[in-house]
Image (spheres, rainbow, N blue to C red):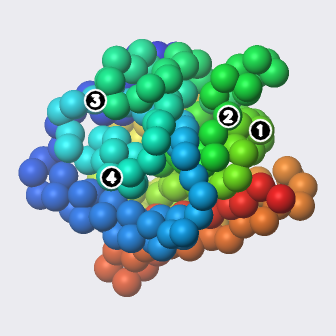
Amino acid sequence: MPELKSEKIYLTKHLLFFEKFLLKKRKEILIILKEFLINKNIEDVLDIGSTEDTINVSSNFIIKNLGNYKDYKSISNQKIKSDFFSKKFHKSITEDFSDEDIKNMASDLVISNATIEHVGGLSNQIKMCRNIIKLSKKYFIIITPNRYHPLEFHTKIPFIHWFPKKIHRSILKIIGLKFFSFEENLNLLSKKDFEFIMRHLGQLDYNIRSINTFFIKSNLILLGKIN
């Protein structure tokens, strides 16, 4: 992903009510994550897709509130300056990682929130997950919005993302949301898509949980373990 593209996703400050809504949902996700991580021997955590955005409180909220672990690291296609991370690697998660890269950044837990829908097509999403597994010593977590929730949280427009992707992208162009009409900027996943990616990577120990918004699954949370 080009660096400017990833920054554009966070360019505009959310309206106050929507920011409060996002924070509420991320707090619900945190409950599930902490339940999964309780009593697990974890020293270092690697965050995939960190952002330098300081406008929205919800940005980096999950990684910064995950728990009291010894080291936090970051891999991002943005230049991360925050001292929160002890190690920072400026690189896209869809690129190739050398053995030295993996040795330097591998962590007990690898986590990615709201990134996989922004890395491009299916082949890039598979490559991202493969790299996450390579970088994980023990556990991995990948979180993404559910394509089949009525509200699309990036454009904040309901229902049109249920059309075939080609039609959805054409509508976005027509109504002036050209940026999100490109697959490399927004490619939403359903639970079936998530499961397809995992099957493509072989036998993995994982399960997919979710949180609801308006009684419908709004966010998918993949919790995995390295065998």
Measured in 3D between alpha carbons, the distance from the residue under mark 2 to the one under mark 3, in whole angstroms, is 25 Å
Which of the two residues, 29 or 227, is positioned nearer the viewer here? 227
Which of the two residues, 217 or 59, is positioned nearer the viewer here? 59
In primary-sequence order, the first of circles 4 and 3 is 3
Q: Is label 1 in contact with label 3 (beta carbons under 8 Å)?
A: no
Q: Residue at x 49, y 21 (%)?
A: 88
Question: Can you tell which quarter of the image residue 6 is in?
Answer: top left
Which residue, given by chain and number where applicable, does mark 2 sit on? 106
Q: Where is residue 203 in the image (x, y as percent from the top left)?
A: 89, 61
Which residue, given by chain and number where applicable, does mark 4 sit on? 65
Callout 2: SS: loop
Q: Position of residue 3 (x, y in %)?
A: 46, 16
In primary-sequence order, the first of circles 4 and 1 is 4
Neighbour tally class for label 3: few under 14, some 14-19, many 20 plus, Cα within 10 Å: some
Which residue, given by chain and number where applicable, does mark 3 sit on? 53
In primary-sequence order, the first of circles 2 and 4 is 4
Measured in 3D between alpha carbons, the distance from the residue under mark 4 to the one under mark 1, in whole angstroms, is 24 Å
Measured in 3D between alpha carbons, the distance from the residue under mark 2 to the one under mark 1, in whole angstroms, is 8 Å
Residue 129: tell me if it is visible: no
Callout 4: SS: loop
Neighbour tally class for label 2: few under 14, some 14-19, many 20 plus, Cα within 10 Å: many
Measured in 3D between alpha carbons, the distance from the residue under mark 1 to the one under mark 3, in whole angstroms, is 27 Å
Neighbour tally class for label 1: few under 14, some 14-19, many 20 plus, Cα within 10 Å: some
Which residue, given by chain and number where applicable, does mark 1 sit on? 134
In primary-sequence order, the first of circles 2 and 1 is 2
Q: Is residue 67 left or right of residue 127?
A: left
Residue 3 sits above or below residue 51 on the image: above
Q: Assign the C terminus to one quadrant of the image.
A: bottom right
Q: Is label 2 in contact with label 3 (beta carbons under 8 Å)?
A: no
Q: Which residue is drawn at 44% across and 26% down?
A: 86
Callout 3: SS: loop
